[in-house]
Amino acid sequence: MKVLAFGASNNKQSINQQLAQYAAKQVPNADITMLDIDSLEMPIFSDEREKQLGQPEQAQAFYKAIGEADLVIISFAEHNGSYTAAYKNVFDWTSRINMQVFQNKPVIMLATSPGPGGASSVLAAASGSAPYFAADVKGSISLPSFFDNFDMAEQKVTNEEFNSQLLNVIETL
């Protein structure tokens, strides 16, 4: 199974990138591609820029990567209760290529933060809107208090409730 995984953040030390990678490694026999949102930096989307630039290569590459995957795993970082500007911009540009950004692929949506909320606000927004963009959301799981529930040396989640929920979702694939 080809798994595309990424943290929806352009932070080089993204805890969401680490969580997405951990989740992808739980998929049996996965061929994992880790995407770095920072590599998809583009001008801030606007109608005027779209008329000038067309569809940037980065948005086309993102859309193609989703199309080539059998499963997409996204872990959302939360900035002020919403998406990071970096992810939102990539998503906005890509939605102009095709509103069915997720191309009916199965998607596991995750989120984490250093605090007890676990980025649950952005996860709820992402999960709620995903079907409008042709995502087949298989699961939506938040990991609260990342640094209390993730072993940085072992690169693994230590929270058994989260692990159980994640494995239950993976078993449905």
Image (spheres, rainbow, N blue to C red):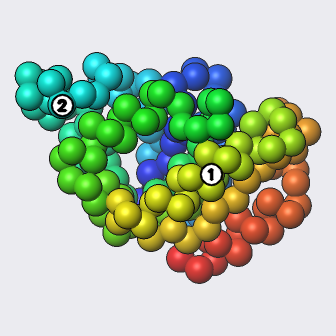
Q: Nearer the viewer, residue 69 or 8?
A: 8
Task: Name the residue at 77% across, 44% down.
Answer: 118
Which residue is at the far right? 148
Task: Name the residue at 49% across, 63% down.
Answer: 107
The quadrant in which the N terminus is found is bottom left
User: Could you say which disc has been placed on residue 49 in the image?
Assistant: none
Residue 22 screen position, x and y as percent: 67, 48
Residue 141 screen position, x and y as percent: 70, 59
Q: Is residue 70 visible?
A: no
Q: Secondary structure at mark 1?
A: helix
Say which label, 2 or 1, has the lower sequence index.
2
Q: Secondary structure at mark 2?
A: helix
Q: Is residue 18 left or right of residue 91?
A: right
Q: Amino acid at mark 1?
A: Leu
Query: Which class describes the residues within 10 Å of circle 2: few (<14), some (14-19), or many (20+)?
Result: few
User: Could you say which disc has been placed on residue 47 in the image?
Assistant: 2
Q: Is residue 50 above or below residue 149?
A: above
Q: Quadrant of residue 130?
A: bottom left
Task: Name the residue at 64% across, 72% down.
Answer: 169
Q: Amino acid at mark 2?
A: Asp
Q: Quadrant of residue 163?
A: bottom right
Residue 69 screen position, x and y as percent: 36, 58
Task: Name the residue at 28% across, 60% down.
Answer: 100
Residue 81 screen position, x and y as percent: 65, 37
Q: Which residue is mark 1?
A: 123
